[in-house]
Amino acid sequence: MKNTPKDGLAGLKENVASDAASGFIVFLLALPLSLGIAKASDFPPIMGLLTAIVGGIVVSLFSGSRLTIKGPAAGLIVIVAGAVAEFGGGEQGWHLALGAMVIAGLVQILFGVFKLGKLMDFFPLSAVHGMLAAIGLIIIGKQIPVFLDVNPLLAKGKEPLELFASIPEFIANWDPKATLIGTISLIIMMSWPYIKNPIIKKVPAPLVVLAIAIPAELLMNFQTTEPAYALVHIGNLVDNIKFNASFEGFAQTGVFIKFVIMFALVGSLESLLTVKAMDMLDPFKRKSDANKDLIATGIGNTLVAFLGGLPMISEVARSSANIANGAKTRWANFFHGFFILIFVLLAAHLIELIPNTALAAMLITVGIKLTHPKEFIHTFEKGKEQLLIFLVTIIFTLGVDLLVGIGAGILTEILVNLLNGKPLKAIFSAPTEVSFTDNDYLVEISDAAVFTNYLGIKRKLEAIPSGFDVTIDLSKTNLVDHSVMENFEHFKHDYERGGGSVTLIGLDAHKSLSKHKSSAMKRK
C-alpha cells in the first residue's frame, strides 16, 4: 500500500506540486462548463464561476471527501431552470429561486448533521439512473436551439418534449456560421475520449474547443456581425457579488417547498453517488465521510445561494479528471477554485469571446453521456424489470418533473418486488439476525432484502467490527432485489479493504432474473 498523503497544511506542503498541477487542469475543464451550466440554468453565467470558486476555495477546506471537485453540475440544470421559470422567469425568477436554494442548503446541512448520508441507499439504482438519463435528454433538448444559435425567444417557456418537437422550427431559423463552430466543438468533444496518444489525451477537450472556437469567432467577427446572444456575457465578478437571494417566493408555498425538496434531495443524491464512486478510484483507498461532506456542501450551497450562485455538488467528470491527473489531497480542489478566481479577476474579457454554440456543444456531450444508448442496454442486462423502472422514471420526468419521475420509479420498483414475491410486511423492514462464533459473524436475513428495507440491514452490517469473516445468509429470503445485490457488492468491497472477508450464501434455491452479476434473485 502506498503511503497515505497527509491532510491539512502538512498535506499542502507535501503535495503542492501534484495538487496544483491537477487543480490547474481541472480549472481548464471547469471554467467553460461552469459558464455553460449557469447559462443553461437561466442564471447569469458569472454565477457558475462563483459557485466553482466557493466550492474550491472555501468548501475544500472542510469537506469530507479528499479528491472530489465541488462546483455547479449539469445534472441540476433542469431543477434550477425550472425554479427560475416557475418563480416568474428572468431576474425575478433568479432571485426567488435563490431563496429556495438557501433553505435547501440548510436542509442539506441537517441531512449531514443527522447522518442521513445513508439515505442514498433508499433510492433504487435503476430509478436513479433513469432520472440521470432523463436529465441528459432535457439538457440536449434545451441546448439544441443554443447550438443552432436561434433567437432564445423561440425556445422560451417550452417544456422538454415541446423543445424536441420544435427542432424543425429551430433548424429553419439556424445561424450557419455559429452552428459551424458548434459542430466542430461537438466533434472534438465526442471524439476526444477515443484519442490514443497519452500526451494529447491529457489536454482537456473543453480547452481544445476554446482554442479553436475563440479564434474562429474572431475571424468571423461575431462581435459586429452576430446578434448579442451569440456570445457569452458575464460582467464584473466584484460588481455582481451581493446578497441576491429573495425569500418572497415563499408566498408561492407549494412551488417553494417543491424546489427546496428537489434541490436538497437530488443535489445530495448526485453528490453522494460521486463521493462513493471517487472512493473506489482513490489510489490510496481512503474512505470519505459522507455526512461531513454533506454538511460542507450544504454550507457552500447556503453561501453561494445568498450571493447568487448555482447549487454545487461533488461533480463526477471534474472529480474523475482530478484523480486521473495525479491529485493527492483536498488542495487540488482548492487550487481549481483559486485559478478560476484569478482568471475571472484578470482575464474576464477573454471569457466574453466564447461563442455560446461552443458551450452548447459541451453540454450536449454531457447530455449524451447521461442518456447514451449503452445506459439502456446495461439496464436491460440487469433485468427486464430494471429496464421498466428505468423507462417509467424517464417518461414521468420528461412528462411532469424530476420529483414525480423519481417517485414513479420508486413506486414501480415496489410493485415489481411485490409481484416477485416480496411479502407486504417486508416493505420497510427485514428481520436481520447477527451472531458471532469463533472468528466469524453470521448475518441471517429473512423475508426479503429490497431497497426499501436495506437501511435496516445496512445498519446491522455497519455495526460489525472490521477484520472478521462475515457470512451473509439469504436462504430465508423470498427476494433480493438488484439494488441490494449491488449494495452487498459495495459492502464486500469496503469491508475487505479493512482486512476482513465477506461471503454471500443461501441463494441456491433462488433463480436469477437476468444474467447480470448483480441481478435480482427470486425464490424458485
Image (cartoon, grey):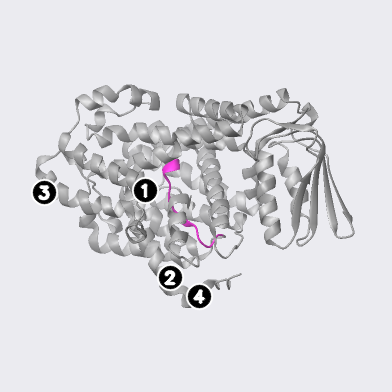
Residue at label 4? 9
SS at circle 2: helix
Q: Which residues are magenta?
A: 65-76
Residue at label 3? 219
Q: Is residue 233 left or right of residue 308?
A: left
For label 4, the crowd category at 10 Å Cα-Cα, with few meaning under 14, some 14 to 19 and many 20 or more, is few
Q: Which residue lies at the image location 40% right of the left edge and 53% below the top edge?
A: 51
Q: Is residue 37 left or right of residue 390?
A: left
Q: Earlier in the sequence, mark 3 or mark 4?
A: 4
Q: Residue furthest front?
A: 196
The mark found on residue 194 in the picture is 1
Q: CA distance from mark 2 to mark 4?
A: 15 Å
Q: Is residue 461 magenta?
A: no
Q: Which residue lies at the image location 24% right of the left edge and 41% below the top edge?
A: 182
SS at circle 3: helix
Q: Is residue 172 above or below residue 335?
A: above
Q: Amino acid at mark 3?
A: Leu
The mark found on residue 18 in the picture is 2
Residue 16 in view here: yes
Q: Residue 76: image x %, image y %?
A: 44, 41
Single out the mark in the foreground, 3 or 4.
Answer: 3
